[in-house]
Image: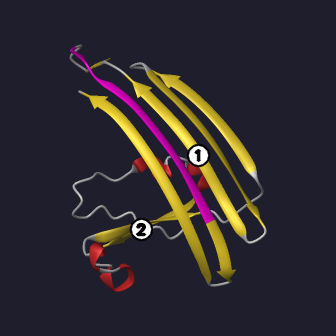
Amino acid sequence: MIGVRVSMTGTGQTYPFHLVSDMENIERIEVLKGSASVLYGSDAKGGVINIITKKDTEPKTKITTSTGSFGKEEYKISTEGSLGDISYRIYGQKAISGKFKDGNDIEWKAHDNSENIGVMLKQDLSDNANIILNYTNGDDDFSF
């Protein structure tokens, strides 16, 4: 996600954290406290968290699976690379979790089954300009 605004102001939606779940692609994170509207516009009056992704690299495909407590399962697949002045990233992930017990040994019935897919295409127009097409679709079945 290069230069993509993810402000959710006024939408009633929460931030789509799945967009940055692949920490391997993050170069650094900048936190600007206070008003940053001069640099980032009127949506940044409380501050900005700027996530800078790594520059395009060699083509790579990654498949990850994990499991853990509370019925947790996670599956991810992504592929990225570039063809000339066009770079791409395609990904999909699925996360499942279930009931759990808290510190007082009380069982909480919970269920989460989420799926996210996305594609990003970027074409460099010059050294200082590019155009990005980004599509993300998510579906979440959650109860607590």
**Pick the front one: 3 or 67:** 3
Sequence order check: which comes first, mark 2 or mark 1?
2
Task: Please indicate whether residue 79 sits to the left or right of residue 143 in the image.
Answer: right
| Whether residue 34 can be seen here | no
Residue 113 among those drawn in magenta: yes
What is the number of the mark on residue 91?
1
Q: Residue at x 37, y 79 (%)?
A: 40
Q: Amino acid at mark 2?
A: Arg
**99 to 18, vertically: above or below:** above
Q: Amino acid at mark 1?
A: Tyr
Does the magenta stretch mainly form a helix, a strand or a loop? Answer: strand
> How far separated are the C-alphas under marks 2 and 1?
19 Å
At numbered mark 1, what does the secondary structure look like: helix, strand or loop? Answer: strand
**Pick the front one: 36 or 142:** 142
Magenta span of residues: 106-121
Residue 69 location in percent, x, y? 43, 20
What is the number of the mark on residue 22?
none
Residue 94 location in percent, x, y? 49, 33
Task: Please indicate whether residue 124 sits to the left or right of residue 47 in the image.
Answer: right
Q: 10 Å neighbourhood of mark 1: few (<14), some, or many (≥20)?
A: many
Which residue is identified by label 2?
A: 5
Q: Residue at x 50, y 71 (%)?
A: 3
Residue 39 location in percent, x, y? 38, 83
Q: 10 Å neighbourhood of mark 2: few (<14), some, or many (≥20)?
A: few
Residue 26 location in percent, x, y? 57, 57
Q: Name which quarter of the figure residue 129 lies in.
A: bottom right
At numbered mark 2, what does the secondary structure look like: helix, strand or loop? Answer: loop
Residue 141 among those drawn in magenta: no
Q: Residue at x 66, y 72 (%)?
A: 123
Q: Name which quarter of the figure residue 142 lies in.
A: top left
